[in-house]
Image (spheres, rainbow, N blue to C red):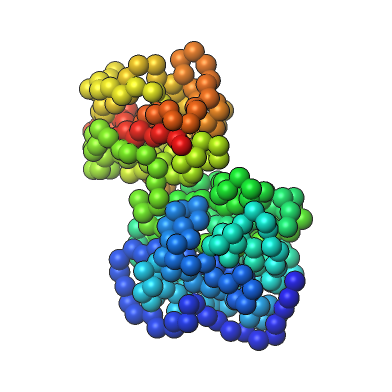
Amino acid sequence: MRASTNIILWACGLFVAPSATAQVGLNLDFGPSDVHGTPGPSEGAAAQVGGAWNGVDTDALSGGTFPVTIAGLVDTSGVPTPVTLVINDLGTGLQSFLYDDPATVGGDDALLDDLAFFGGAATLEIRGLAAGQYDIFTYAAVPSGADHRTRVRIPSSSDPIQTVGGDFSGGYQAGVTHARHAVNVAPGSAVTLQLNVAAEFMSLNGIQVVPFGATGDLGARYCTPGATNSTGFPGEVSAFGSPRRVDNDVALTASSLPTNTFGFFLTSQDQGFTATPGGSLGNLCLGGAIGRYVGAGQILNSGTNGSFTLPLDLAATPTPTGLVSITAGEAWNFQAWYRDSLLGIPLSNLTDALVLTLL
């Protein structure tokens, strides 16, 4: 670990921040600036969104007075933004941590092998984002050991507290290298990240702020748009993660749903079309043997963001006759069912559908 008494705030060498109203994506890398460096534009990490990365020099912040505000952040296109990052170290001090993990190369090495080490709880605020829905990827992996765990919470997200830590040899995996939270940013509001120690010590490698729908989502949507729901918009399904079956890192998201409504995902190897099944407002776009994700923890609530996410276990895919394992090369279809209403009458609805083939 290394520390410096100087405080230098830098972000790709740019410090001009003009006003902006459109949603933008941001990539941030935490760690000392002189060893592993900052990822290049080809590094998409778990969000599969590359572009410019902002470097946050933790050597410059170590030993300083908090809170610290970092300005001059650029978006993924390299354009200066009005977004600022406010770091409030509430623990025993922020330090830099370095370790060369042989499993990481290139941009993964730059992102993960240097990091900010906090001795206790820390809070970060992202201010100045344009209103809208975002996915926040928080990287909290410690390359020197899988026993270190960081607890990540975003109070404004309906997604739960997530614990991160593990071995990178399997690639980017939710809960191992990063947490993912969906947030709905109101005009003038900030996104607050709360980090705490889950085991041994906590860390922060980087953050990606991605406008919803801009992640490197997997699969191809069809039967779209779905039926309009009580929000005035159709529900949508998307998948993100790794396209490799061996990684077992795929999650489904249903979005543009009514708030605080319950739902679950459906799956089948066959496509089909059944209009308004059982009096639903939507259409069923799956055929054949349809499985339902209704096991423990799989019936989800859309919360205040109107969305829910389910990480899949590809070795335990539901069918009417039991759980099966998806194998590489197979095509599977997914859709979400959810509760809805029409003129105050409780009904159900369905999103559009998505077909996904794992490599």
In the rendered image, the residue lying farthest to the top is 321
* Front-most of residues 124 and 146: 146
Specify whether 129 is left or right of 177: left
| Residue at 38% across, 76% down | 80
| Residue at 23% across, 43% down | 232
- Spot occupied by residue 340 in the image (x, y as percentages of width and height): 32, 33
| Residue at 40% across, 52% down | 215
In the rendered image, the residue lying farthest to the right is 200
Q: Quadrant of the N terminus?
A: bottom right
Above-or-below relation of 75 to 334: below
Specify whether 189 is left or right of 174: left
- Quarter where residue 132 is shown: bottom left
In the rendered image, the residue lying farthest to the bottom is 6
| Residue at 41% across, 65% down | 51
* Front-most of residues 252 and 193: 252
* Front-most of residues 140 and 270: 270
- Spot occupied by residue 162 in the image (x, y as percentages of width and height): 59, 48
Specify whether 174 is left or right of 348: right
- Spot occupied by residue 243 in the image (x, y as percentages of width and height): 46, 41
* Front-most of residues 336 and 103: 103
Residue 175 visible in this rendered orientation of the protein: no
The image shows a total of numbered marks equal to 0
Above-or-below relation of 92 to 210: below
Residue 236 visible in this rendered orientation of the protein: yes
Specify whether 303 is left or right of 172: left
- Quarter where residue 347 is shown: top left
